[in-house]
Image: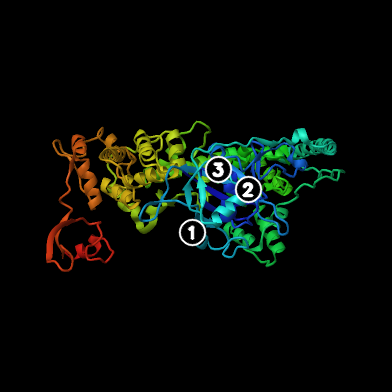
């Protein structure tokens, strides 16, 4: 079994990360070796895994160096602890190494999922070594080299083999790899390492004295927080107040500005952010760029627009940080603050705490005093409606969009306010364009495709979804709650072993194909290109049934958002006694349709695997070059590779000439 992880280097903007497959049945000592190799850190047994929520750390040996910050953590033996007992129940952990000399980066490692068997490459061979899948970062990175070269090294040195239930320390893992034995896994291996030390019971009197001092400092900070909460409340109320007096204590200073946070980043990272934010730079130094970028980020209009990308719950979390002041966050809070951390409206400080800079808090208070939260709620709902509009209709009048927008009972908005909000939705958040009195999906606006869609739309009433349907479409890109799509999703998940992300992708693609009038054969071609394989005829029959039901349950542009099944309530789509005909466009699709012919005909479909095929003679040596020529007929379909060897599809090569 392998797990997919994403290691994000802390303190980088834009984020620098590597995604990789890691074997599951290993210990934390073995995982340390693999991560140090994948992340190109020094090979050392002075590593540390931290599970912040559980207050546990994994280290090598039994003598962790404790500091005042370690009071709340238990320490466990990485050599005797198996990772599957931890990573299957958690979503992230922190990994770092402690070496003398140059400081090494720390990484937040997110656990993205597990797979029984990973197949990669055109030959679909099982993965048997750690593998880097993807990375993002600058062209020249001070810590990382070419992932291609590193993958070749991992393939050569870290082959995964099944072995006995051993518990090698870090030095032994290095020695096994050096001798060509790779990474030894064992599915029967169980964790044997308990708690090495409980710092709370072993701290010296000197440390406990320092704890008492820290508690006094916390009490002082709490008083400061209360004062600043009152100040923030006055700002939101629009009152002009004098700045609060600086505290007399000499404790850690508060982060005063967004600029303070930006100054921590490299010049190239700041330049990249400026491009992303549409900030025209005049300065060339790192400090100058940080100053100009901070001014841009703190423009009220910029903040209003960027926060439209975030959910209401994320804004609630941000206001929670303002209320609490500097504090150690929980994982759920960090997840909801991700957008604010990226925008540097929240700072993650070196000691692990988070805080809102004073200037970001002030600007947020100003826009909220002008009714921003109410606007945000209505604008977010309108973007959900626009997204659903693009998926259901592709083109329609503005009145139709207003009908969707008016479905919610959470607030009331008249037509004038609706029009005002619509104008304020930025293009990058709007999947549609307004052309006269039409709302048009962005893709359909190119080459005036929307005019052809309008001509094809049936003379039936528009389908109007419920509020919950709109939220479903906006969140998932397809109707994930529709029973037919749930069954298709379950089929992929249970029958093919692919991860949930790919299951969602395959369902979304089904909606793309069928909503635009594509055929079952088109979708089968897509699955064929994805190289999905099935172990039995039973699986193939289940797939054909699930795909057919999905096609009949998909809302189509041509049907004004109705499904083919629903259209039967308006008028028969075909004459009585006639059947829908399904034809294949490739040999693979033809095989699938033949295998499911009996079931599809019982459902009222006519399967025709002959009309789209072309029989052509193929010549070759039947018994090798010394034997005679042999001729046989072969049926070629339009999307099959052309037999002439050009590499093109038959319909775009020799088939085009016929």
Instruction: Name the mark on residue 156.
Output: 1
Residue 16 seen by the camera: no
Of pointers 3 and 1, the one earlier in the residue sequence: 1
The percent coordinates of residue 541 (x first, y second) are: 26, 39
Q: Residue at x 51, y 47 (%)?
A: 184
**538 vs 437: above or below:** above
Q: Cα distance, mark 2 to mark 1? A: 25 Å
Q: Residue at x 50, y 37 (%)?
A: 188
User: Which residue lies under the disc numbered 2?
Assistant: 95
User: Which residue lies under the disc numbered 3?
Assistant: 166
Circle 3 or circle 1, nearest the eye: 3
Crowd rating for badge 1 (residues with CA inside 10 Å; few <14, some 14–19, many 20+): few
590 displayed left or right of 206:
left
Please tell me whether mark 2 sits on a helix, a strand or a loop.
strand
Circle 2 or circle 1, nearest the eye: 1
648 displayed left or right of 354:
left
Q: How many marks?
A: 3
């Amino acid at each position: 079994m392998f797990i997919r992880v994403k290691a994000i280097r802390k303190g980088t903007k834009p984020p620098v990360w590597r995604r990789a497959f890691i074997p599951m049945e290993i210990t934390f000592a073995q995982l340390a070796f693999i991560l140090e190799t994948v992340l190109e850190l020094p090979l050392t047994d002075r590593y540390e895994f931290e599970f912040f929520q559980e207050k546990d750390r994994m280290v090598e040996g039994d003598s962790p160096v404790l500091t005042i910050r370690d009071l709340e953590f238990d320490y466990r033996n990485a050599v005797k602890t198996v990772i599957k007992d931890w990573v299957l129940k958690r979503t992230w952990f922190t990994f770092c190494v402690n070496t003398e000399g140059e400081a090494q980066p720390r990484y937040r490692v997110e656990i993205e999922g597990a797979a029984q068997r990973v197949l990669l490459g055109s030959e679909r061979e099982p993965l048997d070594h750690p593998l880097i899948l993807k990375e993002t970062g600058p062209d020249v990175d001070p810590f990382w080299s070419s992932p291609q070269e590193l993958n070749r090294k991992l393939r050569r040195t870290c082959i995964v083999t099944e072995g006995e239930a051993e518990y090698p320390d870090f030095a032994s893992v290095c020695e096994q790899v050096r001798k060509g034995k790779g990474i030894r896994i064992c599915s029967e291996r169980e964790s044997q390492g308990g708690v090495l030390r409980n710092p709370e019971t072993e701290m010296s009197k000197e440390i406990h004295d320092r704890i008492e001092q820290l508690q006094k400092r916390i009490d002082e900070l709490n008083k400061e927080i209360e004062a600043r909460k009152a100040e923030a409340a006055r700002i939101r109320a629009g009152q002009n107040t004098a700045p609060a007096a600086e505290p007399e204590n000499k404790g850690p200073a508060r982060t005063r500005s967004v600029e303070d946070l930006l100054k921590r980043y490299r010049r190239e990272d700041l330049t990249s952010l400026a491009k992303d934010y549409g900030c025209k730079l005049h300065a060339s130094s790192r400090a100058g760029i940080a100053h100009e970028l901070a001014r841009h980020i703190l423009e009220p209009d910029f903040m209003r627009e960027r926060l439209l990308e975030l959910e209401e719950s994320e804004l609630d979390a941000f206001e929670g940080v303002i209320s609490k002041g500097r504090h150690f966050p929980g994982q759920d809070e960090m997840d909801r603050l991700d957008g604010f951390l990226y925008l540097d409206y929240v700072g993650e400080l070196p000691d692990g705490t988070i805080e809102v800079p004073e200037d970001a808090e002030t600007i947020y208070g100003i826009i909220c005093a002008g009714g921003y939260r109410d606007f945000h709620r209505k604008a977010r709902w309108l973007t959900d409606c626009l997204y659903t509009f693009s998926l259901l209709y592709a083109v329609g009048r503005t009145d139709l969009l207003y009908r969707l927008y008016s479905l919610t009972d959470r607030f009331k908005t008249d037509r004038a306010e609706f029009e005002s909000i619509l104008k304020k939705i930025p293009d990058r958040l709007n999947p549609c364009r307004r052309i006269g009195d039409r709302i048009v999906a962005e893709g359909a606006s190119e080459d005036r495709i929307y005019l052809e869609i309008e001509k094809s739309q049936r003379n039936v009433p528009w389908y109007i979804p419920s509020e919950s349907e709109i939220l479903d479409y906006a969140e998932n890109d397809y109707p994930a709650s529709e029973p037919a799509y749930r069954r298709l999703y379950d089929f992929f998940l249970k029958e093919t072993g692919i991860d949930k992300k790919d299951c969602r992708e395959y369902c979304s693609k089904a909606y793309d194909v069928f909503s635009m009038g594509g055929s079952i054969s088109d979708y089968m071609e897509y699955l064929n290109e994805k190289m999905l394989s099935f172990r039995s005829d039973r699986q193939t029959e289940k797939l054909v049934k699930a795909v057919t039901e999905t096609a009949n349950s998909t809302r189509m542009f041509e049907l004004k958002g109705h499904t083919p099944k629903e259209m039967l309530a308006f008028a028969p789509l075909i004459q009585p006694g006639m059947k829908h005909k399904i034809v294949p466009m490739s040999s693979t699709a033809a095989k699938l349709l033949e295998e499911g012919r009996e079931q599809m005909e019982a459902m009222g479909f006519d399967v025709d695997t002959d009309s789209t095929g072309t029989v052509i003679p193929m010549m070759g040596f039947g018994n090798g070059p010394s034997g005679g020529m042999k001729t046989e007929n072969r049926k070629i379909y339009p999307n099959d590779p052309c037999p002439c060897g050009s590499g093109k599809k038959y319909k775009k090569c020799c088939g085009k000439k016929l």
